[in-house]
Image (cartoon, rainbow, N blue to C red):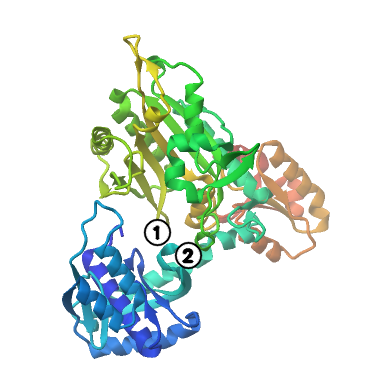
Amino acid sequence: MQNQSPDLQALRHTTAHILAQAVKRLYPTVTLAIGPAIADGFYYDFDTETPLTPADIEKIEKEMKKIIKESLPLEAFTLNGDEALAYVDGQKEPYKRELIEDLLNPKDPAKTPATEFSFYKQGEFVDLCAGPHLDKTGRIKAFKLTSTAGAYWRGDEKRQMLSRIYGTAFPTREELDAHLERIEEAKKRDHRKLGREMKLFAFMEDAPGMPFYLPKGLILKNRLIEYWRKIHKKYNYLEIQTPQIMMSKLWDRSGHTGYYMDGMYSSLIDETTYFIKPMNCPGGMLAYGIDLHSYKEFPLRVAELGLVHRNELSGTLHGLMRLRQFTQDDAHIYMMESQLKDEIKSVIRLYEDIYAAFGLNEFYFELSTRPENSIGSDEGWEKATTALREALEELGRPYEINEGDGAFYGPKIDFQIHDSLGRSWQCGTIQCDMQLPERFDLTYIGADGAKHRPVMIHRTCFGSLDRFLGVLTEHCAGWFPFWLTPVQAIVIPIAERHHEAAQKVLSQLEAAGIRAELDDRSEKMGFKIREAQLQKIPRMLIIGDKEAEEGTASLRSRENGDEGAQELGGLIEKWKREADF
């Protein structure tokens, strides 16, 4: 919960308890699950006979206001394991019992079993909770319940489907109102809505989690790929392509079947199990091993735009943001250990250059350290973590520590990007890996003529090209940079007698490489202009009698509105420069 103070977390966590108390008052048979504070507010999950719906929200909010007005004190108390189990059994709260049992008998042997459990009481309501909370319900000044959803208990689709209520709370009404305005703006910018209106991409029930790119959307994606290739060439990357389906023994060797089996699609071919790749790494290892490499080649930067498939839960799919099929802009960089820190710096600079091209100039870094379930030596993890940390510090980049959230094979730096609405998106990542080179027996010939083991970085700039397009669509509300936008200009004749002149203008634009369209429908001018604005076309060229006679066009641009008659030659040259990345 980056940028969220402990006081704000306590305020929102307390509001979640008030929500649960209100629901229990209104629906006494409801069973409680969990209710944490999250980045933008809080939620609480309930097991109900019938799902809670938006129609219930108003009634629940009204009851919450009563609880706040009662200004009930929040009182903490602790119980030992047996007492805690007996207490929640008396309350008929089976989900709380399961949580307590898991803490008493952790599955991970490295975790210490809990001996005491804290509860918080406010009036008649008591909840198992670690806290912290405000001292009384009357401290809540501004809150709002925002939506309802379904959620599986503990994210497991084989478990009970629960009713989730989302909400948010702020210290002041002004802050809450500003947040709610951002929510409304986010709805207008929803990439699924804009993608449909702008005819960019679509989602079909016949292929859940797998986008259909329409002609304009594919122009957008291909243009992004062209830019990706150009800047990677500038930074001396080579590009490869590896198979989408490879034998299971490869994934056993890489360790992915031990960590990601549930997320992998398989197929039986000639009585042998194959996996559709969920990531590019093992193929990249095989490609490196084809040739004998020298230290003189290092750092060797090898990139791949790989189409990957992951068996995501159906309830987690969300437009382009969470897919089962997507293009991952991966790269593997092989080097000597002495080159590691400098190469991390190079990747950071590459990412910063790329994000700036899209107006994404606000981001922060997270350094994620070794998780409990990992492979490799303590020494290797320490060296990799130190290299990541020192690279950030020497570049003067502030960062946060994300304890235990590294990949199973190595620590990483994540780029958390802020969009125009202030939301955070995890895009680029830099992962140090001293494990896969060992597993695949990768070597290089050193200056001494002997074989040595390379150090490797995994890195993705966009992460998923598709997801990045979703983020970018919402960031710029569909008004993409001129060089990227699918349709850069539209020619609009005022009347039928202007069609021939308009067609000539279109031909000039197309010959110059400008992506343009002609709207010669028998519609009113105002309608055509509104349609072009809805399609987020940044330049309109209007052709009337004067323009047809003089060989000019009247320009309307997104930036400046009506700019009057323009000479086409100069305009086209200007646009060609703008269209170049």
Could you say which disc has been placed on residue 462 in the image? none
Q: Residue visible at 38% across and 69% down?
A: 179
Which residue lies under the disc numbered 1?
A: 423
Asked whether residue 357 is in view, the answer is no
Image location (x, y in percent) of residue 354 = 44, 40
Image location (x, y in percent) of residue 386 = 24, 36
Q: Classify 10 Å Cα crowding around label 1: few (below 14), some (14-19), many (20 and above).
A: some
Could you say which disc has been placed on residue 186 in the image? 2
Indicate the amino acid at tag 2.
Ala
Q: CA distance from mark 1 to mark 2?
A: 10 Å
Q: Decide: marks 1, 2 in contact (CB < 8 A)? A: yes
Indicate the amino acid at tag 1.
Arg
Q: Secondary structure at mark 2?
A: helix
Image location (x, y in percent) of residue 82 = 21, 74
Q: Nearer the viewer, residue 40 or 552?
A: 40
Q: Residue visible at 54% across and 61% down?
A: 314
Image location (x, y in percent) of residue 264 = 52, 47
In the depicted structure, whether residue 516 falls above or below residue 160: above
In the depicted structure, whether residue 174 falls above or below residue 453: below
